Image (tube, grey):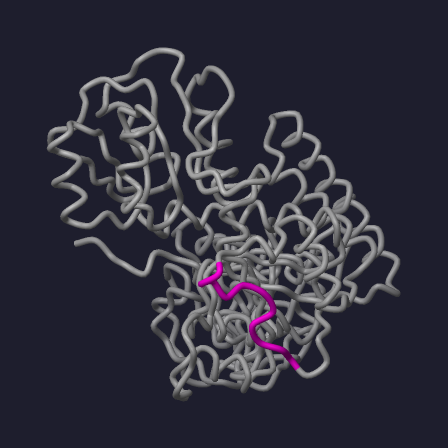
Amino acid sequence: MLDNRLKMCAEMVSGKGIACDVGTDHAHLAAELVLSGKCRRVIASDIREGPLEAAAKTVEKYGLSDKIELILSDGLKNVPEEGVSDVIIAGMGGETIADIIGNTDADFGDSVRWILQPMSKPEYLRKMLYKYKLEITSEKIVEDGGKMYVVMCAEYNINCALLTEADSLVGFSDMNDPLTAEYRSKDIKRLNKVADSLEQAGKKYEAAHYKALACKLENGFETYDIHEIYAYLNELYPFNTQEKWDNSGIIVDNYDMKCDKVILALDITNRVVTEADRQQAQLIISHHPVIFDPLKKLSFRSPVYALAERNIAAICMHTNLDKSPNGTNGVIFRRLSERFELEGEPELFEDCGNGIGFGFVCELKEKMKSKEFGMILKEIFGCETVRTSADGRYMIKRFAFCSGSGGSMLSEAVAKNCQAYITGDVKHDVWIDANNISMALFDCGHFHTENLVLEELRYVLEQKFPQLDIEISEHSTDPCVYI
């Protein structure tokens, strides 16, 4: 009656109470669970009338109308909670299954076993399960009709970790099982194929990331000394180039200074530390220093306290990253040159000597209207809003930019004969000055002009350490909301 996918689902059912088969189709699984004696009662639900009519024929055929209840339900919305010990959701996409679990208001209790068989994106489903505090306790690969499928069993665990993207791809099936090895081999080929396509499309960050994921899937994770990671970053963005007032470097130690998981963030906030802790990361690399001014008091609400308490190290790269040709401003220049047709070589905006400095001055090949220029900046930086001067130049050709809080450098842009200046955190008096001299000033936000450097950091680290699990924090977000 059952194909191999559903046979494995049936094997994983606990049989301790009522089983619920969501998206039952013909109710074959429900019938098998009752006929085999594994379950005394089964709820079979579907979102459409047609499958339920087909299910009713199966129930009637085997005389199981007193043991199988058919329910019209969108996911789990109409399914009664009482007595349910197992929920089976099979034959749907991983995203759909995750949505069904995440969108239910029902409380099925902490002891419910979730048996899930995604037809696609099992990695997405795994990651979401752990966000829902559902830990995968068993995972099998089955072959059916010449194709291989994942079947997983998950149970509630309030203390379960969060999965990184790499974790979710690796999964939890037994590597000694030949089917697992074959399934993983196909996944590795798929990831490398995606990487090749991205590389041909000129998307170097994404291509390198997929290659690194494939490497981890094939060779596993590796632990590195944090000082080794620091030394490599120092080669690329020398820490001795930081400004005298800055505080870049290894700011917080952990006990053994080794790591196999790294979180990247613009700022080390309490949410970022919690995310790193739940992903079992031992190191956070940030742009802004988590300790900037001398600490006279350490509150338990401080991210520094949280780092020390959870044994997570921190490397911070601030002005040394801003000054580097391949750092924050270098990334902005590449983004601008992808969208604007520029002429000539860029020149340093604030030259600090030895070929490094803050920002660049560029020239457009053709003049552009200020509003059009600003709209493209909004897309480049992913801003919800861009502030611009009311009386700025209508047409722009020569412009300067500096990441972060560079409003105080407006006079330098004027001295370099620029018609426009791009930065963040512009103060009121700077807007007045810009309007007085008809400068097209664009405030794209401190966060948005700097957060894009995280992709560059992941890129260079994955090039050097492909078996290091590197995740850009989900909580590296704009600290402001706009209403």
- Residue shown at 51% from the left, 47% from the top: 453
First to last magenta residue range: 244-254
Q: Nearer the viewer, residue 27 or 224?
A: 224
- Residue shown at 62% from the left, 74% from the top: 280
Q: Quadrant of residue 69?
A: bottom left
Q: Quadrant of residue 170?
A: bottom right
Residue 183: horizontal and vertical position, in percent? 78, 51
- Residue shown at 22% from the left, 29% from the top: 440
Instruction: Answer left or right for 108 relative to 30.
Output: left
Instruction: Answer left or right for 220 relative to 358.
Output: right
- Residue shown at 47% from the left, 40% from the top: 329
Q: Nearer the viewer, residue 115 or 48?
A: 115
Q: Is residue 78 above or below residue 455?
A: below
Q: Nearer the viewer, residue 359 or 304?
A: 359
Locate the C terminus by quadrant.
bottom left
Asked if residue 441 can be seen in this view, the reply is: yes
